[in-house]
Amino acid sequence: MATLFSEPVGRVKLALSALGAADTVTVLDAKVPTAAAAAAALGCGVAAITNSLVFDVGGAPLLILASGAARVDVRKVAAQLGTGKIRGASPEFVLEHTGQEIGGVAPVGHPEKIKTLLDESLKFHEVLWAGAGDHHSMFSISYVELRRITGAVEMPVR
């Protein structure tokens, strides 16, 4: 029996394939819109969940891939990047720039490439889990592979 995927998950699956990454997308029975819910459903620690957080930097999106156990320090990130103020993005801004809703945003599969930062604390986990485009889907990946497919800049974010 074929599993049906939402359009955003389909785009993530296509992006993974186009980037030469394994398609490890898993569709869960229950919604997992938070790192805690995802960790409970997947049987892993919250710190191994990779949150895809979109911020607004003067009207441009910034994607920060952060550990589910981390709280991003936007002042620290702004200082490291030399940018102006980094603001949390509205749900409409996130959807516009990623094609995905908050709570299901994936690191890939967006309409346009987004500048991406990778929380260096994630490198201590052998397997990471990231959103795959909707509230029911996640995919597993290694830190090195996540960095490769996103072109992310490694940075301490907390």
Image (cartoon, rainbow, N blue to C red):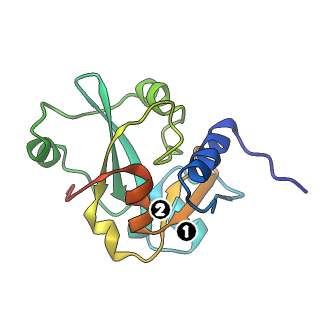
User: For the N terminus, which image quadrant?
Assistant: bottom right
State if disc 2 and disc 1 touch (CB < 8 Å).
yes
Badge 1 amino acid: Ala
Mark 2: which secondary structure?
helix
Q: Residue at x 64, y 49 (%)?
A: 13
Q: Which residue is mark 2?
A: 36
Q: Which residue is mark 1?
A: 40
Mark 1: which secondary structure?
helix
Q: Which mark is residue 130?
A: none
Q: Is residue 79 visible?
A: yes
For this view, does 69 lie left or right of residue 107?
Answer: left
Badge 2 amino acid: Ala
For this view, does 155 lie left or right of residue 136?
Answer: left
Spot occupied by residue 144 in the image (x, y as percentages of width and height): 39, 67
Image vertical order of residue 62 relative to residue 130, above or below: above
For this view, does 137 lie left or right of residue 38?
Answer: right
User: What whole-number distance in Å separates the C-alpha atoms at marks 1 and 2?
Assistant: 6 Å
For this view, does 21 lie left or right of residue 116?
Answer: right
Spot occupied by residue 69 in the image (x, y as percentages of width and height): 34, 64
In this orientation, which residue lies closer to the viewer: 59 or 150?
150
Please identify the quarter of the rendering in which residue 46 is found: bottom left
Image vertical order of residue 27 relative to residue 6, above or below: below
User: For the C terminus, which image quadrant?
Assistant: bottom left
Spot occupied by residue 71 in the image (x, y as percentages of width and height): 27, 55
Q: Residue at x 72, y 58 (%)?
A: 29
Spot occupied by residue 11 in the image (x, y as percentages of width and height): 62, 40
Q: Is residue 135 visible?
A: no
Q: Residue furthest right?
A: 1
Please identify the quarter of the rendering in which residue 38 is found: bottom right
The total number of labels drawn is: 2
